[in-house]
Image (cartoon, grey):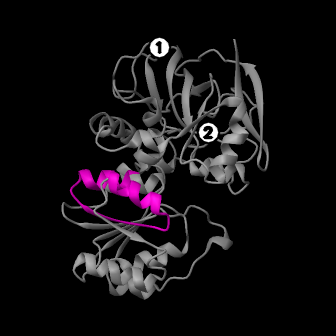
Amino acid sequence: MKGRVAQMTGIEQITVKEFDVPKAEKGQVIMKVLKSNICGSDVHMWEGKHIFKNHVMGHEMVGEVYELGEGVTTDYAGQPVKVGDKICPVYYLTCLKCEACLEGNYNVCTHGSDFQGQVADKYPHFTGSFATHYVIQPNQFFYKVPDGIPDNVVAGANCGISQMLYAMEGSGLKPNDYVVVQGMGGLGLFTSAICDVMGANVIAVDAVEDRLNEAKAFGAKFTIDMKKFPTKEERLAEIKKITGAKGPDMVVDVSGVPSAFDEAVRMAKIGGTVIEIGNVSIEESQCTTIVPGLIVRKCLTVKGILRYQPIHLYRTLQFLARYHDKYPFNSLTDKCYSLDETQLALQKAANKEVKRAIIEPNL
């Protein structure tokens, strides 16, 4: 049987290629992709701003079991699986043997990207989710999807939502804490909903009014429009009014803007926590200036988060099963495209003409 993949073949250039769908080897699962979100990092890759280039695109996905390899009878929660079951895989590998894995840091496994970022012509070809099929490798966690969660919602579970659930569950957040969330794109909205469930008071910060309105629907108690408060001094003053002069207990930066980190350090209360997720580039051009003495004098905890522990995908699916009706997760994806329209979908996403585009490879 033939399948198709969308490969990046140059900066801002996508080519759809056709290959034989491989047979499932021992420990593998061949998944038929139902839907795949365009993540912000996919746009960065397409624009040539990422280490992955000329590869099969896509990593946020939901699909169904097409073929089970020898020895695969359950998902990684011990739930029996069969052909046709709806599943969601962790998008990176966990080798269980490298230095990072041996210390329990599975989310930064040194072999995590052995297949992600691979060119299409290299076997097994189907290594990204902008494709009709996807090969789940041995030691690549996957879980059955609970009944009742829309595919549009599940498609983003294995990236942004899982990352934010992992970050917040390990953050020390307490009920009634004040949390500033910088940037109300997908990660910011996920953070708001999770913090709301945990009983915290979310202060959403963004320069786009529509995003701030969405933040309220995702549980934010307060919003700060950067157009109305254009300087960091004005924003800090407004946050102090909201928090009773002490400042927020926690600041979560998912803005992707380097200078936001300096502002986060200035915002956080004495003894507070800053969680940095939005900035992943290590290029010199992405440097920013901070005052280290503020971290010391305020006794701040600063924590960087990359990916998530694999079990958090299972926890995220349970979270969505319980709360997908309370918060408008389904509204975040507003346009679906076929595999042949991947180039157009990426252009629309890069130009912010759509909130969250979805590729449906089998349209």
Residue located 42% across and 75% down the image: 264
Let me know if residue 224 appears in the view. Answer: yes
Query: Residue 223 location in percent, x, y?
Result: 36, 67
Residue 23 or residue 53, whichever sits in front:
53
Q: Name the residue type under label 2.
A: Gly
**Count of number-bearing discs:** 2
Number of residues whose C-alpha sits closer than 10 Å to that of mark 1, classed few (under 14), some (14–19) or many (20 or more): few
Query: Which comes before the other along the chain, label 2 or label 1?
Result: 2
| Among the 4 quarters of the image, the one containing residue 281 | bottom right
Q: Is residue 207 magenta?
A: yes
Disc 2 from disc 1: Cα separation: 22 Å
Q: Which residues are magenta?
A: 190-218
Query: Residue 96 location in percent, x, y?
Result: 47, 39
Q: Name the residue type under label 1.
A: Gly
Horizontal side of 12 relative to 287 (left or right) equals right
Residue located 39% across and 71% down the image: 224
Q: Secondary structure at mark 2?
A: loop
Query: Residue 212 location in percent, x, y?
Result: 41, 61
Above-or-below relation of 18 to 163:
above
Residue located 39% across and 20% down the image: 74
Query: Residue 157 location in percent, x, y?
Result: 44, 39
Which quadrant: the C terminus?
Answer: top right
Above-or-below relation of 10 to 285:
above
Tag shown at residue 58: 2
Tag shown at residue 84: 1
Horizontal side of 199 relative to 302 (left or right) equals left
Residue 100 or residue 244, whichever sits in front:
244
Residue 333 or residue 1, whichever sits in front:
333
Above-or-below relation of 141 to 67:
below
